[in-house]
Image: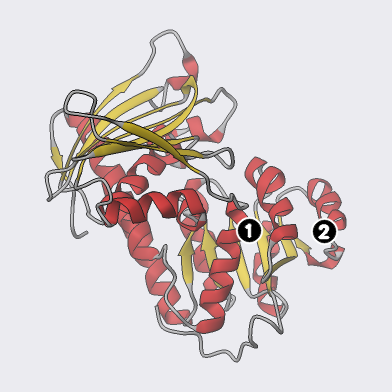
């Protein structure tokens, strides 16, 4: 992504203003409160379909009522110079539409994952970023939290030898009414919770999978899952020979666990995909071949959303590429599409490398 041509002061002089688009649970429970822990980001505008819902949020965060917009007046962001970044926190099927509108307004974009519903939408988003000369970052918050960063370093450095297999589980209970249960809105457990498993495997390996296979369960007696599966188990195979075993569910008690099996031990990350509560353990050796030891790595946690937003601001200020960019978002959408084809067609499916 090219550096912005707009003159921007050094981070020590000016935090960047964010317009938050969408006031759902994630925004209200996590993102808005995270601004208090940000160094370089501050909320300056809101976009919501409900003004009654938005006004109390605006007052709580010092946002003027004239900076609360509805979707019909989204283009007014163009006339708000204090808005530098638009954070898209909308249902999946709206990511591309409002990302394009934000670039048309001359703003940088932080977009929640998955980047979009189709690879074609991803390409349009990246093209719009280039045309606007603005940064596009996909909100993979775990790339900015220290437990996941340490796990990535341990695996890339082969601290316990080569990575052999990965097991990832991201499950929760989701019940109707919920837009994540609607297929035409880009819903389903793979796109919502399974994408964490997919992206974690990339962090660990630095590779893209070549083939996938998936198995889905639609309980016959639960209308909540008439359009999307309740649970999906899937495998990802990588060029190095590493295989990722993943499971995701909208009908199982919360479980967010990651284990990486290496040649000389394994790494466990508890609460791997949660907003907080991570714990990391290393097992070295094997009792069958000699002494084995387990140690816990004590790491200072951070607010994931504050770290993510500050990292985006730093990239904008410096003109450097963002670490979780459009091509990463596109790669995950391609994998999701391949998993969906495997469910529909049965058997192993190759992951497309172009669209």
Toward the top, the furthest residue is 221
Front in this rendered view, residue 253 or 286: 286
Position of residue 10 relative to residue 72, above or below, is: below
Front in this rendered view, residue 353 or 33: 33
| Residue plotted at (50% across, 85% down) | 4
Residue 178, image x and y in percent? 57, 30
Position of residue 74 relative to residue 242, above or below, is: below
Q: Is residue 235 left or right of residue 19?
A: left
| Residue plotted at (12% across, 44% down) | 241
Residue 32, image x and y in percent? 72, 53
Residue 138, image x and y in percent? 46, 59
Q: Is residue 110 left or right of residue 233?
A: right
Earlier-in-chain disc, 1 versus 2: 2
Residue 332, image x and y in percent? 33, 51
Q: Are marks 1 and 2 in contact (CB under 8 Å)?
A: no
Viewport quadrant of the N terminus: bottom left
Residue beneath label 2, please?
Answer: 61
| Residue plotted at (70% across, 43% down) | 29
| Residue plotted at (48% across, 74% down) | 135
- Of circles 1 and 2, the one toward us is 1
Residue beneath label 1, please?
Answer: 306
Q: Secondary structure at mark 1?
A: helix
Q: Is residue 241 left or right of residue 96?
A: left
- Give neighbour class at mark 2: few <14, some 14-19, many 20+ (Cα, 10 Å): some
């Amino acid at each position: 992504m090219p550096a912005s041509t707009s003159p921007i002061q050094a981070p020590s002089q000016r935090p960047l203003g964010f317009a938050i688009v969408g006031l759902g649970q994630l925004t209200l429970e996590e993102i808005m409160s995270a601004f208090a822990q940000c160094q370089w980001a501050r909320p300056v505008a809101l976009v919501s379909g409900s003004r009654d819902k938005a006004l109390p949020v605006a007052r709580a965060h010092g946002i003027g009522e004239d900076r609360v917009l509805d979707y019909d007046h989204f283009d007014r962001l163009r006339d708000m110079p204090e808005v530098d970044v638009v954070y898209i926190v909308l249902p999946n099927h709206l990511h591309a539409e409002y990302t394009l509108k934000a670039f048309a307004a001359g703003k940088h974009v932080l977009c929640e994952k998955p980047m979009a519903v189709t690879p074609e939408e991803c390409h349009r988003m990246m093209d719009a970023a280039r045309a606007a000369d603005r940064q596009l970052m996909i909100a993979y918050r775990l790339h900015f939290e220290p437990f996941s960063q340490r796990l990535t370093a341990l695996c890339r450095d082969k601290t316990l030898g080569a990575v052999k297999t990965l097991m990832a589980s991201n499950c929760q209970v989701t019940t109707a009414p919920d837009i994540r249960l609607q297929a035409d809105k880009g819903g389903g457990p793979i796109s919502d919770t399974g994408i964490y498993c997919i992206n974690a495997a990339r962090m660990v390996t630095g590779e893209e999978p070549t083939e996938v296979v998936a198995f889905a369960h639609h309980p016959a007696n639960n209308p909540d899952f008439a359009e999307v599966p309740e649970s999906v188990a899937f495998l990802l195979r990588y060029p190095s020979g590493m295989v990722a075993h993943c499971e995701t569910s909208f009908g199982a008690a919360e479980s967010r666990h990651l284990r990486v099996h290496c040649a000389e031990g394994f790494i466990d990350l508890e609460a791997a995909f949660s907003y907080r509560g991570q714990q990391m353990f290393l097992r070295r050796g094997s009792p069958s071949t000699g002494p084995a030891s387990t140690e816990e790595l004590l790491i200072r946690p951070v607010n994931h959303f504050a770290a993510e937003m500050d990292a985006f601001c730093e990239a904008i200020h410096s003109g450097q590429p963002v670490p979780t960019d459009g091509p990463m978002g596109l790669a995950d959408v391609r994998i999701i599409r391949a998993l969906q084809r495997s469910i529909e067609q049965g058997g192993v499916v190759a992951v497309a490398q172009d669209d």
